[in-house]
Amino acid sequence: MDLGYSLLLREYVTATEVDYGDCKLFQITCPICHEAIFKAGKYGQDRQYFSHYAASKADVNHCELRVRSLKQDDLVISNLAGHGQTMDQFFGHFRKFIVDWLFVEKSAHIRRQINWMVARPSFMRIAQVFRSFLIQGNQLITYKLSRDELKQVFNEDRSPYWIEQQARFAEDFQQHLLAPNSQSALCFVVAIMIFANITILPPESWRLMTQGHDRQLKQHLQKFYTGDNLTNFQLVLIATLDMLLMTVPYFDLLNGEPGDPANRKLFFQQMVDVVAQVRDKIKLPKY
Ligand SMILES: [Zn+2]
């Protein structure tokens, strides 16, 4: 049959979209009996379809007939609703896992500091300023995620379907973070990005963000983060956000598996390298 249903994404998928390995990662099942199915036929070639396993308990003819009778419009509506639910669920997993995933052995300590930072009014102000900078300065276009970039970051062992979904989740996540009512999610992500760029901050900023009184932090931000300092700081954050959005292991997190520590280090290193290039370009002062 042509159609499968991804339990992970809560969406219908067609056999021609996916590759063999996608069935397992995206938990693709028969839309009727919900048993696991596999992809037959080579990606990009003529005959491609989903098939039940030989040991299946399903009445395969019955499933095939019912799948054929599903209406295209209903599938589109169901996919839209499913994607909304999946994105909501993703944020829960993201909050729970991302700090461990990025900061590995230091994660417990960093999590405590992030909780402290994001609870403070002055820090929320940093996140808001950053959000306006992204939206008004049209920075989203400059750093727009492209599928080609993704192909470079993730090598050939990722399927075209995986790349497509990764780009889609990255774009939707970005939209979510910039929505007016996503204040707490944005604060959390900005705090993570700051932790990934500790070395660009003057030690004073760092101390005040993680320990100081709110009033002291506010005064410091008003004094230091103006003009070029503010612009440069924001450019670094944008480059970090871009890299973070591209490399978040959306599907591993949705599966509740933050992934292999070796891969985590690799992704984080790529993020740090890209950000370092931006920092060199804009010649930030070193502290
Ligand atoms: Zn079935």
Image: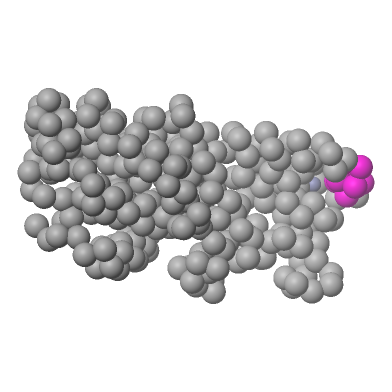
Q: Tell me which residue sits at (29%, 45%) in the image.
A: 192
- Please indicate whether residue 160 sits to the left or right of residue 115 in the image: right
Q: Tell me which residue sits at (34%, 61%) in the image.
A: 271
The C terminus - image quarter: bottom left
Stretch in magenta: 63-70
Answer whether residue 68 is visible to the viewer in this image: yes
Q: Tell me which residue sits at (33%, 37%) in the image.
A: 129
Which residue is more in the foreground, 103 or 143? 143
- Queried whether the magenta region covers residue 6, the answer comes back as no
Q: Main secondary structure of the magenta part?
A: helix
Answer whether residue 100 is visible to the viewer in this image: no
Q: How is the image coloured?
A: one colour
Image location of residue 122, percent across then percent down = 22, 29
Q: Tell me which residue sits at (9%, 40%) in the image.
A: 207
The N terminus - image quarter: bottom right
Residue 229, relative to residue 136: is it above or below? below
The residue furthest front is 227
Which residue is more in the foreground, 66 or 229? 229
- Please indicate whether residue 143 sits to the left or right of residue 184 in the image: right
Image location of residue 106, percent across then percent down = 19, 49
Which of the 4 quarters of the picture holds residue 83? top right
Residue 146, relative to residue 121: is it above or below? below
- Queried whether the magenta region covers residue 68, the answer comes back as yes
